[in-house]
Amino acid sequence: MVNIATMLLNDFITLSKNNTSKLAVLIDPDRQQPEELQTLVDLAVSCGVGYFFVGGSLMTDVRFEETIAFLKEVSSIPVVIFPGSNQQISSTADGILLLSMISGRNPELLIGQHVIAAPRLKASGIECLPTGYILVDGGRPTTVSYISNTTPIPADKPDISAVTAMAGEMLGLKLMYLDAGSGALNPVSSECIKKVKASVETPVIVGGGIRTYEQALEAKNAGATIVVVGNSLEEDPNRLLDISAAFQPVVTK
Ligand code: 1GP
């Protein structure tokens, strides 16, 4: 039997090899109003969104499970956990980004939390997508920079992000996630995305501070395999109509 999480990883790899991209909508159950979730799902389905990412930094267990169950019930868009803590594990999801925060030097986020989570992860049966999580300075402190107690990589030092990703790949990580942090003032630059993409074979996920069609298109054109948008859609789900247009196939006559 092919495990769905393996299928996800293979999908990401295929997208990356073909230099194509998909949009992921990040849902933070603590910030998403339950009554608006159905609207967002309907929009996501009609806009061809590739993935739902579910996670957050300050999450209650009940809302987490409820949100994943709801998403699985009402759509066939794959649900991927983007965990903010070792408590955010659910076998109902299709996969989990097992994040090692390789931009930082906090041992808890490099390996400590993973050791705590490992027995639950194994018992849950969910397959893990080993991901190098690279936090890049987004112009202001974010929840993730504060909670993780790490220093983001300077935005104007893309070479540091690139060699960090290289080391992560050499350690066996299968995906790289370049994140400016939720609500960042400035998204990760296209120069940084290009350098990381050129330095590794892995798919590259990019998020943090992407609020517009132009920013999404820029990340996509720089080589992002998955572009993640969260905050902007919490403010106005209808922005998805505009942002998702960056991922529509180009029609040529
Ligand atoms: C944050 O990459 C995600 O970890 C998405 O960021 O909420 O700013 O879109 P936004």
Image (tube, rainbow, N blue to C red):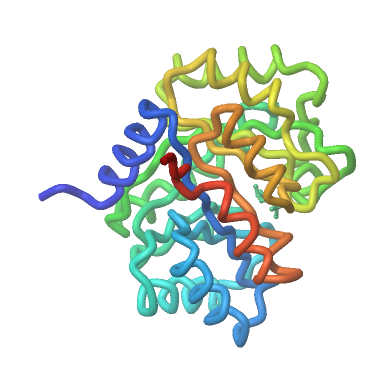
Q: Which residue is situated farthest in the right direction here?
A: 140
Which corner quadrant of the image does residue 126 belong to? bottom left
Q: Nearer the viewer, residue 197 or 214?
A: 214
Q: Nearer the viewer, residue 250 or 246?
A: 250
Q: Say which residue appears at 43% left-offset and 54% top-offset.
A: 50
Please indicate whether residue 184 sits to the left or right of residue 4 in the image: right
Which corner quadrant of the image does residue 48 belong to? bottom left
Q: Say which residue appears at 66% left-offset and 58% top-offset.
A: 230
Which image quarter holds the C terminus?
top left
Q: Position of residue 142 (x, y in %)?
A: 81, 48
Relative vertical location of residue 166 with respect to residue 23 in this rendering, above or below: above
Q: Position of residue 220 (x, y in %)?
A: 57, 36
Q: Say which residue appears at 29% left-offset and 38% top-offset.
A: 10
Relative vertical location of residue 229 with respect to residue 157 in this rendering, above or below: below
Relative vertical location of residue 244 with respect to residue 41 in this rendering, above or below: above
Q: Which residue is situated farthest in the left direction here?
A: 1
Q: Nearer the viewer, residue 187 or 101?
A: 187
Q: Position of residue 61 (x, y in %)?
A: 55, 72
Number of numbered labels in the structure image: 0
Q: Nearer the viewer, residue 244 or 9?
A: 244
Please indicate whether residue 225 sits to the left or right of residue 220 in the image: left
Which corner quadrant of the image does residue 73 belong to? bottom left
Q: Position of residue 29 (x, y in %)?
A: 61, 71
Relative vertical location of residue 161 with respect to residue 45 in this rendering, above or below: above
Q: Which residue is situated farthest in the front direction here?
A: 253
